[in-house]
Image: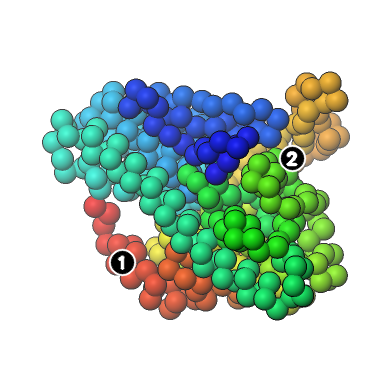
Amino acid sequence: MLIEGKHRRSIWLEADGRSVGIIDQTRLPHAIVTLRLETLADAAHAISSMQTRGAPLIGAVAAYGMCLALQDDTSDEALELAYRRLVGTRPTAVNLKWALDEIMAAVRNRPRGERIAAAYARAAEICEEDIAINRAIGHHGLALIEAIAAAKPLGTPVNVLTHCNAGWLAAVDLGPATAPIYLAHEKGVPLHVWIDETRPRNQGAALTAFELNHQGVPHAVISDNTGGHLMQRGLVDLVITGADRVTAKGDVCNKIGTYLKALAAGDTGVPFYVAVPSPTIDFALADGRDIPIEQRSGEEVATVTGRTGDGRIETVTVVPEGSPVANFAFDVTPARLVRGLITERGVLPATREALAAAFPERVRRAAGPVG
């Protein structure tokens, strides 16, 4: 996608063929800063500190984190240590474990002298596969947007509401939830996007708005509690969110506040869709209530960071001193509230049967040992 008119990806291999470049997303939208990851520790910190974030992207970064670990030590013991360190950085998004398992499967039974090259090759494939998956999701989601546009008066925009950031900054490129939007925009379909600010980290206001602004997509940032009002007024045609984990029976775990959007959509008859790359589906887990929900630092809720009128970046406290803070990072939307899962293999009902039929190879793998 574009930043200041130039194509960028969210992750890339640096010119030395060893280290990995990423965009520091904690600095967006006010500064575009890139980071060079050179060690396992760099990759683990980037994920846990959310310098890099989004389920597909942290999987890609973790894959390259394994490559960086192998540069120092190609032994089985080092592999296991690197795996455990990276898998513990973010517990909710399943893409992280999926990507680590992919690297382990690629190198585990190889001679030590072949492991580095095999790991880098699989990490690069994971990145390219992510782009292809998101493009396919985009085409399937585009059909939904076009169908709504065809039923509206000519030239009337399709109003899409999205939550958090499941855009190209959350993936390698395109992004699952934004791919249908970008393809519709490229095709000339009139549309407008309502962007939830998405407290506490304001990932909608900071990241999704940054993306859409640079792509020239009409949009407006709204407070988190506005979506239900807009739906009641007929100002939302469909909701498209991303996901951090989807269970085998179609329950959706995503950024905190997603469940409330699904409830409002269900009450007002607005179709609620979730854009889901297949690595985000956890076929080993059936019930959304069993997904581990990350609890992050209360500082994220108690403070807000922004740019002052004279250009300084400042963090201010908005919670009274002494008030305890809880910060649950995700919630779970039951499958019954989801109109459809937009996957690379089509728009599927949020049911065990539909997911298993679409991805039988993933079901088989979940039933047996990795690698």
Q: Which mark is residue 301?
A: 2
Residue 66 percent across, percent down from the top left:
34, 35
| Residue toward you, 117 or 140 | 140
Q: Amino acid at mark 2?
A: Val
- The reply, left or right, for residue 345 in relation to residue 71 is right
Which residue has dot 1 on it?
361
Residue 249 percent across, percent down from the top left:
48, 72
Q: Earlier in the sequence, mark 1 or mark 2?
A: 2
Label 2 crowding class (10 Å Cα cut-off): few <14, some 14-19, many 20+? Answer: some
Residue 91 appears in the figure: no
Q: Is residue 141 above or below residue 302?
A: below
Residue appearing at x 74%, y 48% in the figure: 197
Residue 36 appears in the figure: yes
| Residue toward you, 123 or 74 | 123
- The reply, left or right, for residue 337 in relation to residue 71 is right
Secondary structure beneath dot 2 equals: helix
Q: How is the image coloured?
A: rainbow
- The reply, left or right, for residue 274 in relation to residue 232 is left
| Residue toward you, 56 or 177 | 177
